[in-house]
Amino acid sequence: MKKTMTMKMAKVSKRWLRGVSFALALIIMVSGGMILNSASTDAKAKTKYVALTFDDGPSTVTTKTALKALKKYDAHATFFVVGNRVASGKKYIKKAIEQGCEIASHSWDHTNLAKLSLAQVNKHFEKTAKAVKKAADYDVKLLRPPYGAVSTTMKKKFEHPMILWDVDTLDWKYRNTPSIMKYIKKEVNDGSIILMHDIHKTSVDSLNTVLKWLKKHHYEVVTVSELAAIKGVELDKGVYCNIK
Ligand code: NI
């Protein structure tokens, strides 16, 4: 009698154990799936985009350092080139395009376009675009007016998008990495446009730090046109300081 009871109890507890372990396995599978799911949603939600831009180049001395850092971090930048520097910097323009970077116009000779007539502004844009086309068979679409100077006439009548910035690193002024990083950390946001200059050694030398920080903070570094495409914004005439 006693023996049968013990056997019965053993059978029951075996069944009970089986039930518990099945339930546990189910809980682990479901919660594991939930964790995976929320991890991928987090990664998606965390990805932000920023357009890194360089003015005043190309430089036969420093632009290559910028390209090397961009390649290392799989980042794309927009180079707003000065027309009269295009022929001498042809090699770097071609390399930038090969790496997925964008080439745009920064006038023919860094003139303040806001002081010119619309016809003269158009001439600056077209002359630079023609030089880039000749150097690299590439169509320039965007203008960054030198000094960010835009006249009312340009605002109303210039036919191409004018790209300004919302993160000014003041890299031309302070010439060191900590200062560049200070402005980026303070001002960068999803959809920001960062202004730098690839003609200064201190600026291109800062890029490993800049790109590492942006990556760590879930920013994908893209060209201005890529940023617009990602944000679903069709770049039209007018002024853009960021693309949200
Ligand atoms: Ni400039």
Image: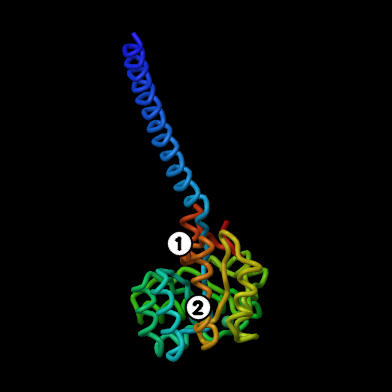
Quarter of the figure with residue 103: bottom left
Q: Quadrant of ligand 1?
A: bottom right
Q: Position of residue 35 (x, y in %)?
A: 46, 43
| In this picture, residue 8 sits left or right of residue 49 | left
Of the numbered discs 2 and 1, the one sitting upstream in the chain is: 2
Query: Of residues 132 and 207, which is closer to you in this image?
Result: 207
Q: Residue at x 46, y 71 (%)?
A: 77
Q: Which residue is mark 1?
A: 226
Residue reaching furthest to the top = 1
- Secondary structure at badge 2 equals helix
Residue reaching furthest to the front = 2
Q: Position of residue 143 (x, y in %)?
A: 53, 72
Query: Of residues 171 and 131, which is closer to you in this image?
Result: 171
Query: Of residues 6 and 119, which is closer to you in this image?
Result: 6
Q: Which residue is mark 2?
A: 207
Q: Decide if ligand 1 comes within 8 Å of the CB at mark 1.
A: no
Establish if 37 lies above or below 82: above
Establish if 244 lies above or below 130: above
Q: Residue at x 34, y 73 (%)?
A: 98
Q: Are marks 2 and 1 in contact (CB under 8 Å)?
A: no
Q: Residue at x 52, y 77 (%)?
A: 54
Query: Of residues 124 and 9, which is closer to you in this image?
Result: 9
